Amino acid sequence: MRRYTRRLFASSMVALIVGFSTTTSAFAQGPGPTATETIRMKLARIYDVERNSSAETAAIDSTVGHSYLSEKCLEALPGLTSSERVEFKQLLVDVVRVMLRKQISRILATEVKWGLETIDGHEVTVASVVKQDSNNLDVDWILVMDGSDWRLVDIVTENASMIRTWRRSFKLIYEKGGWKALSKKLHKVGMGDKSR
């Protein structure tokens, strides 16, 4: 009888521990898909639709945190007037669409191994390793929660942040040629999005 009681107690404790850890991880994730599940699903949606179509544009726009991205980039451009800031945000949307199309097509045409999620303040980093030719590239996808949806706000390839690179470039162009030079460059890059 005593042996049966110990087994029952031990199996009850195991069930309690397993149940607690399952509840804890489910609680930590919160409602809805994880950041990893979200970015995988959204990238696949972009990759699967017809190139340069309105469906592709809609898929990109539902993936990217355009407002967050533009605010981060504008931090490097404090001299812009309010009307220039508005125009910058509009031009940046087209640039993001063009650049994301290129990057996603290149990355998802290869083998991607998804890694862990790490949280840093309000940002979540989803790690991945992308196999290109005989090389493995570390690609981190940085997401933030926007309402009830995860939004992509940066891609870090081999420790090179897309947003930091853009900020430096925008700042250099602006310092050399002012708003006219920067808007011309943004317009030129974003024109790749106007092919339809």
Image (cartoon, grey):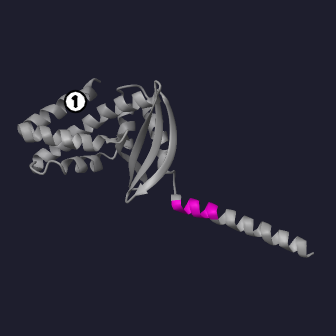
Q: Which residues are magenta?
A: 21-28
Q: Reply yes or no: does residue 23 show up in magenta.
A: yes
Q: Reply yes or no: does residue 74 show up in magenta.
A: no
Q: Quadrant of the N terminus?
A: bottom right
Point out residue 121 in the picture as x, y percentages from the top left corner: 37, 60
- Within 10 Å of the Cα at label 1, are there few (<14), some (14-19), or many (20+) other Cα atoms? some
At 50% from the left edge and 51% from the top edge, which residue is drawn? Answer: 34
At 48% from the left edge and 51% from the top edge, which residue is drawn? Answer: 117
Point out residue 15 in the picture as x, y percentages from the top left corner: 73, 65
> Picture quarter containing residue 26?
bottom right
Point out residue 21 in the picture as x, y percentages from the top left corner: 63, 63
> Picture quarter containing residue 87?
top left
Say if residue 48 shows up in the picture. Answer: no
Q: Main secondary structure of the magenta part?
A: helix
Between 80 and 176, the one lying in front of the other is 176
Local secondary structure at mark 1: helix
Residue receiving disc 1: 189
Whether residue 76 is situated above or below residue 138 in the rendered picture: below
At 52% from the left edge and 37% from the top edge, which residue is drawn? Answer: 113
